[in-house]
Amino acid sequence: MFTSTTRDRLGAAAGAAFVAVLFAGNSMATSGQSSSMHPTGQEILRDATYAAASTTATVGFMLEVSAFLLFFVFLGFLANLLRRYRAEHDVGVASATAVVAGAVMLAIKLGSVSPVVALYLDRDRLSPEVAQVLSDINGAAFLISWLPFALFVGCAALALQGIGHIGRPTTYIGLAAGVAGVALGVWGLVDPVAASPLAFLVGMLWLMTVSIRLAVRPAPGATAPLDHADPVIVAASGRP
């Protein structure tokens, strides 16, 4: 049986594992493929054929998808951590927004896998035009995911600082990445080809750093939430 401290360590470490596995998987999945910001339909079909025959690309794709399962674990850990401290610190809005934004980001990213799978399955029958549309849907979903992820990073920074788990420098970096992520995410939707992933990458680095910090130094015990408090037993003497 895991102790609560061990479970907290594993839950916190899942955030760093998410970032590491995601980037490793993406690097493997896209190795040997076109590096164009907006590849043509012919290039997309050629890359799909290459990926189908490449064990490295297949393993990389599986790692990318699996990485988001790790983020589910981290998000659950974060929600439980913030819930334990909610009665002692006024972080309700920030903590709830962070958890919701993280869940929305996950939904967008997992949903964006569908056009990639369709492209892979029908690569021998698709026209270049349709292949490019499927690829662009996946790319647009990636840009859209910047918005909830930026909100997640900014609100998580506020919530964790509010319960005393990160310092001001880390909080300011998270807030800056969140604000810049929203701005760059909106601009990226206006001009996808010129979109800059800088804030997204900083947010990912922030998440990895905070995850490692929480895994190495688990949170101290907190007051149990009211719905888990021990009931008060009142004994009365005499007959009813």
Image (tube, rainbow, N blue to C red):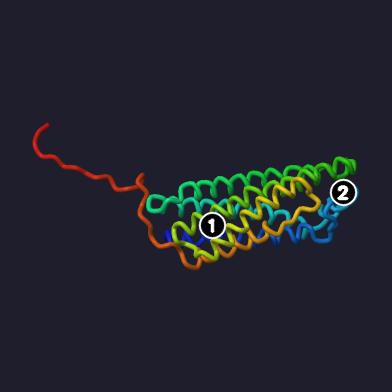
**Hey, which residue is sitting farthest left in the picture?**
238
Q: Can residue 114 be seen here?
A: yes
Name the one closer to the observer, 96 or 48.
Answer: 96
Q: Could you tell me residue 103's position as x and y percent?
A: 58, 46
**Hey, which residue is sitting farthest top in the picture?**
240
In the displayed structure, does residue 228 sit left or right of residue 143?
Answer: left
Among the 4 quarters of the image, the one containing residue 178? bottom right
Near mark 1 (Cα within 10 A), the count class, few <14, some 14-19 or many ≥20, is many
State which quarter of the image contains the N terminus.
bottom left
Residue beneath label 1, please?
157
State which quarter of the image contains the C terminus.
top left
Rounded to the nearest angstrom, the CA distance separating label 2 from label 1 is: 41 Å
Q: Amino acid at mark 2?
A: Leu
Q: Residue at x 86, y 50 (%)?
A: 44
Q: Could you tell me residue 82's position as x and y percent?
A: 46, 53
Q: Could you tell me residue 68's position as x and y percent?
A: 63, 52
Dot 2 or dot 1: first in sequence order is 2
Near mark 2 (Cα within 10 A), the count class, few <14, some 14-19 or many ≥20, is many
Q: Residue at x 87, y 48 (%)?
A: 45
Residue beneath label 2, please?
45
Q: Amino acid at mark 1?
A: Ala
Secondary-structure class at tag 1: helix
- Rendered view: 73 above or below 125: below
Q: Are marks 2 and 1 in contact (CB under 8 Å)?
A: no
- Rendered view: 82 above or below 119: below
Name the one closer to the observer, 65 or 191.
Answer: 191
Q: Can residue 117 be seen here?
A: no
Q: Which mark is residue 167?
A: none
Name the one closer to the observer, 183 or 222.
Answer: 183
